[in-house]
Each structure stands twice: as C-alpha cells, then as structure tokens.
Image (tube, rainbow, N blue to C red):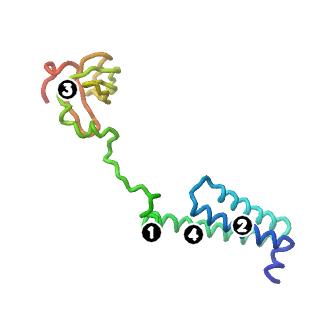
C-alpha cells in the first residue's frame, strides 16, 4: 500500500493542508504578530485530522497527532534553550535589564537625608500610610501605633524602601 493510498480519498487535500499548516507554523515562529498564521496552521492541522478520521484511515490521524505533538514539544524545548543560552538570549526580545528593587529611585538614594525630617500624615497611619515631607508624598509606617490624618510626624529610620515615622516634630522625638 502506497503513501497516497494510505491517506484515502482525501490524500491531495490532506497533503495540501499539512503543507499549509507547516508553513503557517514556521511563519508564526519567526514573525511577531497576533497569531493569525498560528491559528491558520492550527485550523489546517485540525482539518487534516478530521479528514483522516472521517474519510481516511483513523490510524493515520493518530500518527499525525503524535507527530504534531512531538514537533511541538521539540520546538518548545529548542525555543526555551535558545532563550536561555542560544542566539535568542542575545536578541532584543530578551530583557536583560536588572532592577535595583526600588520603584522610587530618588527615595532610595536620599534615605540618609530623610532621617529627622518633619512632615504631615496625609492618611491615617494604621500603622502604614502616606505622609508628605517637603512637598513629596512617601509611603511610611509607624512602629505599631496609630497616627491620625493631619498630625505632625518625624522620620526616625529610613532603610531600603521602608520609612519608619513617629508622631510629633523633630524636637519631640527622641534620637535613635
């Protein structure tokens, strides 16, 4: 039995759909977009399977499914490896920027300058909230006590992204 006979009465359509799906998947792999080529390839592959289950040989449909799954797994393994160590790792697609862990750089750099500053609680601090110091709003926290909105507060500790405050002005707060 030849390959053409094995595919049954839908042999020509099956071969055309297989070629279309392969070409569309290759296009989808290398072209950025919204996936139209991939969806077209998937629909074409599903059409091949339906044709073989309905009018061809079901065994051929299962072979096509197995081969497609094997190719998908191998393709994913290749792409993942390439993103980690291959040519794609040097591509513009891979973000190599590192964060220093702060979303407010001016606050992280000026931490030592903040200690002793006096400001106003913009929200009620229970124990954290927002306060304003020299016209800038900062996320702050107390050591556990509640401070009402509008009260004067002083920064007593500033490390990394944590700013600890105490109720009262600079002259009222004991030095730590």
Residue position marked by numbered label 3 in the rendering: 117
- Position of residue 102 measured from the top left corner of the image (x, y, whole percent): 32, 42
Q: Residue 113 location in percent, x, y?
A: 18, 33
| Mark 3 vs mark 2, CA separation in Å | 69 Å
Closer to the camera: disc 2 or disc 1? 2
> Taking 136 as reference, is 84 left or right?
right
Residue 124 placement (x, y as % from top left): 34, 20
Q: Earlier in the sequence, mark 2 or mark 1?
A: 2
Q: Quadrant of residue 107?
A: top left
Looking at the rendered structure, the secondary structure element under dot 1 is: loop
* Mark 3 closeness class: few <14, some 14–19, many ≥20 residues within 10 Å: some
The secondary structure type at the circle numbered 2 is: helix
Do labels 2 and 1 touch, CB within 8 Å? no
Which of pointers 3 and 2 indicates the residue nearer the eye? 2
**Marks 4 and 3: CB-CB under 8 Å?**
no
Q: Secondary structure at mark 3?
A: loop
Q: In the depicted view, which residue is nearer to us: 9 or 135?
A: 135
* Circle 2 residues within 10 Å: few <14, some 14–19, many ≥20: some
- Image quarter (top left, top right, bottom left or bottom right) of the N terminus: bottom right
Tell me the residue at 85%/74% (across/down): 8
Upstream in the sequence, badge 1 or badge 3?
A: 1
Q: Which disc, if any, is residue 74?
A: 4
Please state if 87 lies on the left or on the right of 27 as rendered: left
Which residue does the numbered mark 2 point to in the structure image? 20
For label 1, the residue is 86
């Amino acid at each position: 039995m030849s390959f053409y006979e094995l595919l049954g009465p839908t042999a020509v359509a099956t071969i055309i759909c297989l070629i279309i799906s392969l070409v569309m998947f290759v296009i989808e792999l290398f072209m950025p977009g919204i996936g139209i080529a991939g969806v077209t390839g998937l629909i074409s592959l599903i059409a091949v399977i339906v044709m073989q289950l309905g009018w061809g040989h079901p065994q051929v449909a299962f072979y096509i499914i197995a081969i497609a799954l094997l190719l998908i797994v191998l393709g994913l393994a290749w792409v993942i490896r390439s993103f980690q160590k291959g040519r794609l790792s040097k591509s513009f697609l891979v973000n190599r920027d590192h964060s220093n862990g702060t979303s407010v750089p001016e606050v992280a750099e000026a931490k030592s300058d903040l200690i002793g500053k006096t400001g106003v609680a913009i929200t009620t601090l229970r124990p954290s909230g927002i306060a304003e110091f020299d016209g800038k709003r900062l996320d702050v926290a107390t050591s556990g006590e509640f401070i009402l909105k509008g009260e004067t507060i002083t920064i007593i500790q500033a490390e990394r992204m944590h700013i600890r405050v105490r109720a009262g002005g600079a002259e009222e707060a004991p030095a730590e």
